[in-house]
Amino acid sequence: GQQLNQSPQSMFIQEGEDVSMNCTSSSIFNTWLWYKQDPGEGPVLLIALYKAGELTSNGRLTAQFGITRKDSFLNISASIPSDVGIYFCAGQLGGGTSYGKLTFGQGTILTVHP
Amino acid sequence: EPEVTQTPSHQVTQMGQEVILRCVPISNHLYFYWYRQILGQKVEFLVSFYNNEISEKSEIFDDQFSVERPDGSNFTLKIRSTKLEDSAMYFCASRTAGGQPQHFGDGTRLSIL
């Protein structure tokens, strides 16, 4: 099945710094999603990307759908303490019996020091 | 904002016992999913459900697992005879049609003793 490689595994940054994380896949996805997970909670959708090359922002967050459809990145600008959490990328195929199933990356643990 | 709700938040069960995890998806959603997350690992797909039948399942979703939508609002995951390795967070998700993103519940932590 599809495998997503997400990097880095963890990041320790100072408040105010920018953050970048990315996911690469061995195969194509039609949709890329970025979720954030806080301890004891479910993944919360941050950004959804539907088209190759698409660049989408949500406040201080910006994500891009790679041209090859095999990668995506997420940037967080001017980090704040509440950005702490685990960030997951997820890829979704479309059509056929795989429609809707999400394949997740391993997650990036973000720690922000005030 | 509408949300996916899951109960219970924590379930402790003896190995070999049956367990049912419950989910109430967002009301106008048509596609339903179960995922699991073993502690410290990534989220893994278990099963998708649409039009009252399973549309896809993973290798994890063996004969011990079943899903049901018994009425217009609930979506359940049953594990018939639990094993120690079933201990994990189980997340329910749902979405509308047309490739819209999935929304997740806060999960049920299943602990098998």
Image: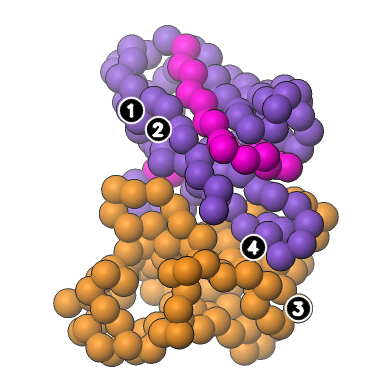
Chain colours: A purple, B orange
Q: Earlier in the sequence, mark 3 or mark 4?
A: 3
Give me the chain letter of mark 2: A
Q: Is residue A19 magenta?
A: yes
The numbered disc on residue A23 is: none
**Where's the C terminus of chain B, which quadrant?**
bottom left
Give the amino acid at mark 1. Answer: Ser
Whether residue B63 is visible to the viewer of this picture, yes or no, is: yes
Whether residue B3 is visible to the viewer of this picture, yes or no, is: no
- State how far apart marks 3 and 2 are (Cα): 35 Å
- Residue A38 appears in which quarter of the rendering? top left
Give the amino acid at mark 4. Answer: Ser
Q: Which is in the foreground here, disc 4 or disc 2?
A: 2
- Count of number-bearing discs: 4
Residue position marked by numbered label 1 in the rendering: A10
Crowd band around label 4 with a 10 angstrom C-alpha radius: few (<14), some (14–19), many (20+): many
For the point 47% across and 12% down, which residue is it?
A: A18
Q: Secondary structure at mark 4?
A: strand
Residue position marked by numbered label 3 in the rendering: B51
Tell me where residue A35 appears, x and y as whole percent: 53, 41
Is residue B112 shown above or below B16?
Answer: above
- State how far apart marks 4 and 2 are (Cα): 24 Å
